[in-house]
């Protein structure tokens, strides 16, 4: 009943203006195996009038949670204004924000105000507000935040960044100063493309000074490989540090990806990890289940029968558990437009996962 009432309220909000210029979409995702159930469903509406766009999004999950978001964006003189307001499924107010942006004479800036019903923005409990002033004129970027914990507006923090400053020999560096209400936060200096070795291999080096610590980072870059269809996942293997001498032992190779494009959107992709426990450093979400270390994926696409583009990707995963050829599972995802404004999505993974979804636009 609550869900029907919420959707009705959204529809009524747009009813005063008629539905001639109303557009939107309805999407849903269902689990079919191992048990039938709703994952989530989303109804998004958009109405444009007098240069302003008004939006509404209602999302419901199978667990019973719901979120309702209303937004508006448009021009007000030289300003670009955007605003949003969010509610939970009760429906109780959760948060709101408004932002006014301006670009003039090479300077980009905005003023943003955010509000939350519960504690945040540096406030422990109760309502809170955050005021942000932002300005950018290359190479300088300035961000200043003020918060209000129902005790008055107070300075929160300031970040000053200088980006892409030239040093020599093609090396550039970034500088960041960070201050908080309590005082000095940190000073960070990052140099890019230093220590070139060969074959496009170089390093980014950084040093971060805080009130009670100094952190040094060294990040390898493999531009000579990554710019083609080969991507190497690697990091620096270190020893010591935090009060003792830091030694750089070697470059640790965690894994690699080879992706070859066969046509406009047809491809084959190979991903192998020597250290699958480190896959989370490079992938979010992690594509492997426990024990897996490799996958091969084939991707296809083409024009749909009724407009749009279909896409299919099929993946084979491998582990060392002793299956046929080391195969641990198979997976596939398909997006098929069955009508000009209706797309069906199907996904499965062996042995017992099957999902069904769709998107209907109007």
Image (cartoon, rainbow, N blue to C red):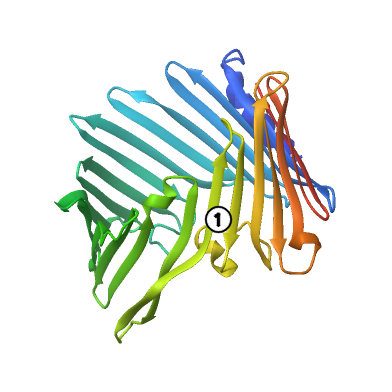
Q: Residues within 10 Å of mark 1 (few under 14, many from 20)?
A: few
Residue at (23, 47) in percent of width and height: 141
Can you name the residue that lies furthest to the top here? 20
Query: Where 359 sits versus 273, above or below?
Result: above
Asked which secondary structure carries label 1, the reply is loop
Q: Which residue is mark 1?
A: 284
Q: Position of residue 214 (x, y in %)?
A: 26, 74
Question: Taking 7 as reference, is 115 left or right?
Answer: left
Q: Is residue 316 visible?
A: yes
Can you name the residue that lies furthest to the bottom here? 244
Residue at (29, 53) in percent of width and height: 146
Query: Which of the 4 image quarters holds residue 107?
Result: top left
Of residue 63 and residue 312, the one placed in the foreground of this image is 312
Of residue 123 and residue 78, the one placed in the foreground of this image is 78
Query: Which of the 4 image quarters holds residue 341?
Result: top right
Q: Position of residue 212 (x, y in %)?
A: 26, 78
Q: Is residue 149 visible?
A: no
For the image, the number of numbered tags is 1
Can you name the residue that lies furthest to the front here? 198
């Amino acid at each position: 009943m609550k869900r029907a009432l919420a959707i009705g309220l959204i529809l009524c909000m747009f009813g005063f203006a008629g539905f001639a210029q109303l557009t939107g979409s309805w999407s849903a995702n269902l689990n079919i195996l191992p048990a039938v159930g709703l994952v989530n469903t989303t109804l998004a509406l958009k109405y444009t009038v007098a240069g302003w766009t008004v939006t509404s999004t209602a999302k419901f999950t199978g667990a019973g949670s719901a979120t309702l978001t209303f937004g508006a964006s448009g021009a007000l003189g030289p300003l670009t204004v955007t605003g949003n307001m969010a509610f939970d499924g009760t429906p109780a107010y959760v948060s709101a924000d408004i932002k006014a942006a301006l670009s003039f004479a090479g300077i980009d800036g905005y003023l943003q105000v955010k509000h939350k019903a519960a504690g945040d923005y540096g406030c422990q409990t109760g309502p809170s507000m955050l005021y942000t002033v932002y300005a950018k004129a290359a190479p300088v970027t300035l961000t200043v935040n003020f918060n209000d914990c129902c005790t008055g507006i107070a300075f929160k923090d300031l970040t000053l960044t200088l980006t892409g400053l030239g040093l020599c020999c093609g090396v550039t560096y970034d500088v960041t100063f960070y201050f908080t209400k309590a005082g000095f936060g940190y000073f960070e200096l990052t140099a890019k493309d230093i220590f070139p070795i060969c074959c496009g291999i170089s390093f980014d080096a950084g040093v971060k000074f805080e009130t009670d610590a100094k952190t040094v980072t060294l990040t390898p870059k493999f531009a000579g490989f990554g710019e083609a269809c080969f991507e190497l996942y690697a990091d620096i293997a270190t020893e010591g540090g935090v009060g003792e001498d830091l030694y750089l032992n070697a470059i640790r190779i965690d894994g690699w990806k080879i992706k070859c494009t066969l046509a406009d959107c047809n491809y084959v992709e190979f991903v192998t990890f020597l250290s699958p426990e480190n896959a989370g450093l490079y992938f979010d979400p992690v594509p492997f289940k426990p024990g897996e270390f490799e996958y091969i994926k084939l991707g296809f696409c083409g024009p749909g029968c009724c407009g749009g583009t279909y896409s299919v990707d099929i993946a084979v995963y491998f582990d060392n558990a002793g299956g046929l050829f080391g195969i641990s599972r198979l997976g596939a995802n398909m997006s098929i437009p069955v009508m000009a404004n209706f797309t069906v999505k199907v996904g499965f993974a062996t042995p017992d996962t099957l999902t069904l979804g769709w998107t209907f636009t109007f």
